[in-house]
Image (cartoon, helix red, strand yellow):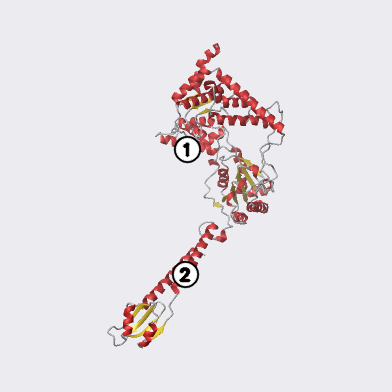
Amino acid sequence: MSSSFVRVLAWLLLIAVWVFMLSERFQGLGSTEISYSEFKTAVAEGRVGEVVLSPSLIRGSFAGDDERTGSFRTVRVEDPDLLRDLQAHGVKVSGTIESTFLRDLLSWVVPAALFLAVWLFIMRRAGAGGPGAGFLTVGRSRAKLYVEQEVKVTFADVAGVDEAKEELREVIEFLKKPERFRRLGGKIPKGILLLGPPGTGKTLLAKAVAGEAGVPFFSISGSEFVEMFVGVGAARVRDLFVQAKEKAPCIIFIDELDALGKVRGAGALAHEEREQTLNQLLVEMDGFDPRAGVILMAATNRPEILDPALLRAGRFDRHVLVDRPDRPGRLAILKLHARGVVMRNADEDLDVIAGMTPGFAGADLANVVNEAALLAVRRDKEAVELADLQEAVERVIAGLEKKNRVLNAMEKDRVAHHEVGHALVAMSLPGTDPIQKISIIPRGVAALGYTIQLPTEDRFLMARSELENKIAVLLGGRAAEEIVYGEVSTGAQDDLQKATAVAKSMVKAYGMSERLGEVSLERERPALQLPVEPMSSRGDYSEETAREIDCEVRRIIDEQHARAHELLAGQKDVLREAATVLQQKEVITGAELADMRARHAPARAAS
């Protein structure tokens, strides 16, 4: 039922009530309203000619010789002698049936109409497929359609993923010139799955493919298929492919595919509706002709939980990795996002920031540029400078400064020695990343201080000695507290967790334990925990092996802790001086700490 019909119905009800009220009003026009006592007196005096009785009202007319002519009306009261008195005085009596229209209207017609209107509103909301959609449209696809003119993104707006762009250029060529492939009998892959960590630009890359090809682009999230009504998800999948075939050539893009395509039959509670939706997607992918020009693209950052039927040849048979960018890629992304930002030395500054941000995804780098611009505005600068960009990187890594979190003198002294301990151990070991900054300004949720190391290059492999050095650096803060105070504090909790994780990986995953040998004891990450599997994080090894793993992890931690302790014991004077300067300035650079070490080097050599 349309909203216009509901409005017409409401107006009809109002008109009916109005007409009834007017009729009641007209019936009383020309009548004189008198009290019941006056009416009884007039009857007793013989001045009433005739009356018409109803359950709640008495209407009548005066006798011809009465000085008051015309009709009258009065409210009827409970009077058992009324009829006897009327007959005794020769009054002509008649009755009438009182209209119950208004009472019936208010008692059941109006409530029924209100109930119908509320029901229609709820059904329309439940099947919301856009303005004006009704309950019968609940199975329609919710995919957003972007026509050729609306997709403004091209490959020029995507940087840092050159390999992925090259993989997808073939799709663009097929959508533009399909006859070139059909001439030799070639078929484009039905499905293209974009894999990669969050924030690397998978959705942006899919839009760029549509923008380059100049074809319609259907965009929908995997979670939008699954609803509380059984069968709705499968109906939406069917409707999506019907719409896509009508708009071919086009691209269908399903974001967050893992919300829809998880392994079927896994978990303690299988989701029947989701599995039906996935089954329908598999059927549709098998059914549509790749020559029709419909390309199905999807993105996920959890490919390990996808159903194997989705990944087989003939469905999502081409997997494109959209990984975190390397240094040239990060520089290209930074330049892309800095196009509308006023900077003094854009090329030099962005090159420095690209070197400071290994492991950052494209979204992180965009956030760095935006934070730097906001900082520059807050400081009333004319342009963004390197200091603003570096501060933005620290914000992304460690969080916002908590200047209202004031440390007392004892805490500040302990945090200063702790952070200088990290930095001195890092400077004393070969192959570690250079120290950029040491700070005791609290940041984020729990960090009371931090030490930033600046990598000189991207690393993809680490040797055993480098991992051991990393553990020693993590334990340097705790060792410094032991040397200065003779006891430890709770400030090393995060350091201990990270050091233990590295040590466990060395023993269980990388085979870097002579006692356990060249084996990997880390269980391969399963797609999902099946009900028949015990919910345990321990791998497939015996209790004796587990005990040996614990002993090896403890040995590695103890050895590197002793190593850090020894390195700092020989630099106690530098540790105390640097901690004192850090308390005064709150922030010192790696170069300043290196100068302090150089001044104390002759004394250490002489001792």
Would residue 457 be found to the left or right of residue 536 on screen? left
Label 1: element kind? helix
Q: Which quadrant of the figure contains the C terminus?
A: top right
Would residue 79 be found to the left or right of residue 292 on screen? left
Residue 188: image x %, image y %? 66, 47
Q: Could you tell me if residue 133 is visible in this image?
A: no
Q: Could you tell me if residue 387 is visible in this image?
A: yes
Label 2: element kind? helix
Residue 548 or 208: which is nearer the viewer?
A: 548
Residue 466: image x %, image y %? 62, 25
Q: Which mark is residue 510?
A: none
Which residue lies under the disc numbered 1? Answer: 370
Q: Quadrant of residue 233?
A: bottom right
Residue 447: image x %, image y %? 51, 32
Residue 198 or 217: which is nearer the viewer?
A: 198
Q: Amino acid at mark 1?
A: Asn
User: Farthest residue in the front direction?
Assistant: 81
Q: Amino acid at mark 2?
A: Ser
Marks 1 and 2, how far apart in space? 63 Å
Which residue lies under the disc numbered 2? Answer: 107
Q: Specify few, some or many for label 2: CA neighbours under 10 Å numbering under 14, 14-19, or 20 or more.
A: few
